[in-house]
């Protein structure tokens, strides 16, 4: 895992995943952490710097390998000042991120770890467009805000239910349908939240987000 930002560090650059995924986590004083966002081709990290916040609030990790575009945060802020459309899109992206974090907070409070694990695996599979996920139990535990043995139990239950198989450092989605049935409603809520705000996405992509309406 590659660290791009740490809490309290200056945000000098912003990152746009083209493939792969970036995880944003909140780090607690005791060293524990929980994921508040997973960013792929639909988004970026470092956007608060465009609006004047020069210090990162999150720990940003590269979850999966891929191609990531980067640029100085000051250059993006200057471009947004020149382009009203870019400025509008950045604001709508920020609204989508805030909405996703609110849903994640509610999810962590109210849903069991198996359902949350299924949600996280679905999100990782969507962004990587691959059923083969390189994912350690340690990192999944970080994302879920639980201990590593809890992740082992959750993955074993998902395997028993025919949704995934797992081995050290690797998870395979064997039935997306099963995984969707197990995942909590927050997976669908986050999809809808992204589609609601990012109105410039291609029609084919928008229809994918609209499909999320079938699960409430």
Image (spheres, helix red, strand yellow):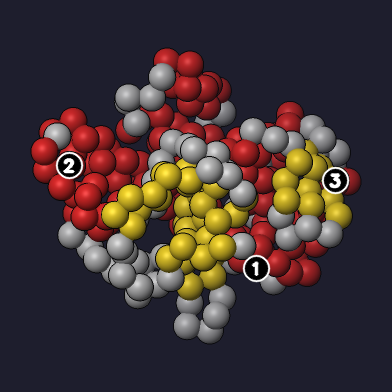
Q: Name the one closer to the observer, 20 or 140.
A: 20
Q: Is residue 80 left or right of residue 206?
A: left
- The spot of residue 187 in percent (x, y) is 56, 40
Asked if one can make out residue 35 in the rendered structure from this viewpoint, the answer is: no
Asked if one can make out residue 138 in the rendered structure from this viewpoint, the answer is: yes
Residue at x 26% of width, y 41% of height: 90
Query: Which mark is drawn over residue 80?
Result: 2
- Residue at the top extreme of this rendering: 203
Q: Is residue 121 left or right of residue 205?
A: right
Residue contact at pointers 1 and 2, CB within 8 angstroms: no
Residue at x 25% of width, y 35% of height: 89
As drawn, 5 above or below 214: below
Q: Earlier in the sequence, mark 3 or mark 2?
A: 2
Residue at x 47% of width, y 52% of height: 37
Q: Is residue 7 left or right of residue 149?
A: left
Crowding near pointer 2: few (<14 within 10 Å), some, many (20+)? some
Distance of label 1 from label 3 (alpha carbons): 20 Å
Distance of label 1 from label 2 (alpha carbons): 39 Å
Q: Quadrant of residue 31?
A: bottom right
**Which quadrant: the N terminus?**
bottom right
């Amino acid at each position: 895992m590659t660290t791009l930002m740490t809490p309290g560090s200056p945000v000098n650059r912003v990152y746009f995943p083209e493939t792969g995924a970036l995880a944003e986590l909140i780090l607690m004083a005791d060293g524990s952490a929980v994921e508040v966002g997973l960013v792929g081709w639909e988004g970026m990290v470092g956007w608060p710097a465009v609006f004047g916040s020069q210090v990162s609030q999150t720990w940003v990790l590269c979850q999966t390998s891929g191609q990531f575009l980067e640029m100085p945060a000051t250059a993006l802020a200057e471009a947004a000042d020149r382009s009203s459309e870019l400025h509008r899109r950045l604001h709508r992206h920020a609204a989508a991120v805030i909405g996703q974090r609110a849903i994640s907070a509610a999810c962590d409070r109210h849903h069991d770890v198996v359902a949350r694990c299924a949600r996280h695996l679905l999100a990782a599979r969507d962004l990587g467009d691959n059923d083969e996920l390189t994912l350690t139990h340690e990192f999944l535990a970080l994302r879920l805000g639980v201990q590593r043995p809890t992740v082992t139990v959750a993955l074993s239950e998902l395997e028993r239910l025919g949704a995934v198989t797992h081995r050290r450092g690797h998870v395979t989605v064997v039935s997306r349908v099963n995984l969707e049935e197990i995942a909590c409603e927050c997976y669908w809520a986050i999809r809808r939240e992204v589609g609601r705000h990012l109105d410039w996405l291609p029609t084919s992509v928008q229809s994918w987000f609209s499909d999320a309406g079938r699960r409430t």
